[in-house]
Amino acid sequence: MAGQREYAWPKGTFLARLPAAMPAELIELGVTRAVPDGTPLVRQGEPGSLVYLILHGLVKVTTWAENGERVLLAVRVRGDVIGEMAILGGGRRSADADACGLTSVCVIKGTAFLGYLQRHPAAGFALSGLLSDRLRWANQRRLEFAGYDADVCLARIVLALAARHGHVVGEGVDIGVPLTRAELGGLIGAKEATVQRALRSLAERGWVLRGHRRVVITDMDGLTKFAEIVSRNP
């Protein structure tokens, strides 16, 4: 547990928003577990009694659309918290959350998490800011996707993912999140076949490389200019 104090949590995550000593104190309230790829952490409709802090890896948040298709809502990274909404509201889970790759989480009882927020007003303000930013991010995505072709929408979400989770590799910038074509479609509201065509279009222009559950931006300037040009001239 002591090693967690040394973590530099990614900017914008819940733990990164807390004052220096507070993340370690919160982590000590729970139990750390390593969970394999695909492990369900939260299930939509179930009552919520636990909160999860992501210490390593990724968690995908999904839900079922009215047409029966699974839609990817968000990707959470280390330093993020999941499951807090049901605890704060006393309701049921609003979405599913599953580990994406080998993931380490700290499992905290809801009562202990609420007690922590009551003892530390700064943590409550940090959580409020996080929830506000999540809502703003979701609203911004809706505005950016409304009325634009799939290749533009895909370029924008790929750039957004790379900005939040990406890392430099030999070919360029890996977006850092292993997503299927269907999951990318869920983020932009498009069918898997449409995403396939849009991704092929971006690759043919030399802006990205495609792989199994992998997208690498090979020309950041070109991809950015493509998205911004359409934004300025709708």
Image (cartoon, rainbow, N blue to C red):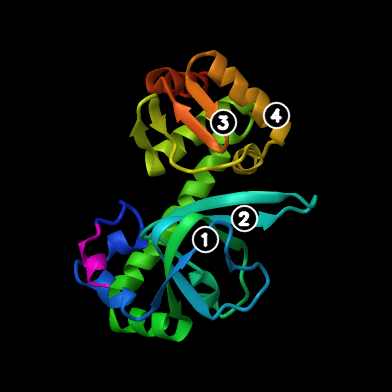
Extreme-right residue of the structure: 67
Left/right of residue 202 with respect to residue 118 in the rendered view: right
Gap between marks 3 and 2, in whole Å? 18 Å
Choose the circle earlier in sequence order: 4 or 1.
1
Residue contact between numbered discs 2 and 1, judged by CB atoms under 8 Å: no
Gap between marks 4 and 2, in whole Å? 20 Å
Gap between marks 1 and 3, in whole Å? 29 Å
The residue drawn where x is 73% and y is 53% is 65
The residue that label 1 is drawn on is 36
Left/right of residue 5 with respect to residue 137 in the rendered view: left
By secondary structure, the bulk of the magenta-drawn segment is best described as helix
Identify which amino acid the numbered label 3 is placed on: Leu
Element marked by disc 4: helix
Element marked by disc 1: loop
Q: Is residue 151 visible?
A: yes
Element marked by disc 2: strand
Residue 194 is marked as 4
Gap between marks 4 and 1, in whole Å? 31 Å
Query: Magenta span has 4?
Result: yes
Identify which amino acid the numbered label 1 is placed on: Pro
- State the extent of the magenta-drawn residues as a range: 1-7
The residue drawn where x is 56% and y is 14% is 204
Choose the circle earlier in sequence order: 1 or 3.
1
Choose the circle earlier in sequence order: 2 or 1.
1
Rendering coords of residue 11 (x, y %): 30, 51
